[in-house]
Image (cartoon, coloured by chain):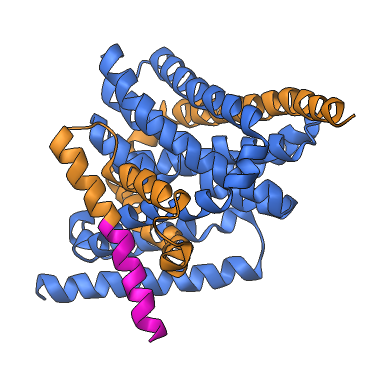
Chain colours: A blue, B orange
Amino acid sequence: MNTISIGVGMFLLTVGVFFAAKKFAVKYKNPILNPTLTTTIIIIIILVSLNIPYETYMDGGKWLHELLGPTVVALAFPLYKYKELLLKYFQPVLVSIFLAVTLNLITVYIILNLLGYTKEMIFTALPKSITTAVAVQIAGQIGGIPSLTAVFVMIAGFTGAIIGPYLLKIFKFDHTIARGMAFGNASHAIGTAKAFEDNLETGSISSAGMILSAILSSFLIPFLVWILF
Amino acid sequence: MKFIKFILQMLLITFFYIIGEVLQNIFRLSIPGSIIGLILLFLFLSSKILPETWVNQGANFLLSLMPLFLVPATVGVMNYFHIFHGKGILLIMGIIVSTCIVFVASAFVCEKLGKTTFKEKEKHLA
């Protein structure tokens, strides 16, 4: 088989598995059934059992991967839509995002240092609380391993979606902005999906938190790396 | 006709992405080109230079498929399974702990500031 037909095959496989996984996720509403996660697991199982290396998979996978860039740009649209809501809560939103982004960087840096991980691993984990599309680009930029960053981003996402609601209950956070910013800042899109279960306003604030923390991180992370290493 | 509009919208968004990448390359910026494109598109929309009806459908379509576009990157973990053996469990726990700290802190400041902001507004109204 030539590269083109392998590429087309891998492309169709990914799209097919994804839409099946999505249908499944809609049917059984459980955050564990996140379509990206289930599709990833199924595709890895297929590749490993057929002895197909990742590089071969990417012959087709790269066509989908290339669309991440324009998709990040498309986030400008919801951000524009939520502008009024953000201006209404300007001060808490701004402080919360600054705090979230700095705390994320500090805690990742300290924890990985204590565990004795290398510089490369710290670079890989630093963008873990921002939306995957941006996180993998930042990781690539600063010399981390983008594929591994994507996995850390997933872990951060599920932490917020699964443990988050308990944290909100324990600390008695009942303010719409508080709940929205927590999901968006810490757990990006996966958290945002959970925030929309609260109501539309919590979800919108979470989306804005996700986008703004991604923008701020993309400025701060390279700067921090430049200073510290 | 609708389909053509749709394609044109996506091309316009991709155009902003390319501009972002070009600017990043020219000025050797450390911010990803996609984020520069995002900021530019946001500024164009906010200043009404670009009407939102020129990008709304294309943007919503791309965003609805974002989880699909992420799959090729996440599949890449198959080359790094060894990292999660042994000490890797601690690494995962560390990521979870860090995320919980960020989560609680984000909500905490809003809960505090949010309330004062509202009170101030109430006072203002009174």
- Work out whether residue B19 or residue A174 is closer to the camera in this orientation and state it: B19
* Magenta region, residue range: B1-15
**Residue at left offset 54%, top offset 26%:** A100
Image quarter hosting the C terminus of chain A? top left
Q: Residue furthest left?
A: A2
- Work out whether residue A187 or residue A99 is closer to the camera in this orientation and state it: A99
Q: Position of residue B43 (x, y in %)?
A: 41, 46
- Work out whether residue A33 or residue A170 is closer to the camera in this orientation and state it: A170
Q: As drawn, is B17 to the left or to the right of A113?
A: left
Task: Decide whether residue B9 is among the magenta residues.
Answer: yes
Residue A206's image quarter?
A: top right
Q: Residue furthest right?
A: B126
| Dominant secondary structure, magenta | helix
**Residue at left offset 74%, top offset 40%:** A176
Whether residue B70 is visible, yes or no, is no
Q: Position of residue A77 (x, y in %)?
A: 47, 55
Image quarter hosting the N terminus of chain A? bottom left
Whether residue A177 is visible, yes or no, is yes
- Work out whether residue B78 or residue A69 is closer to the camera in this orientation and state it: A69
Q: Position of residue B124 (x, y in %)?
A: 82, 27
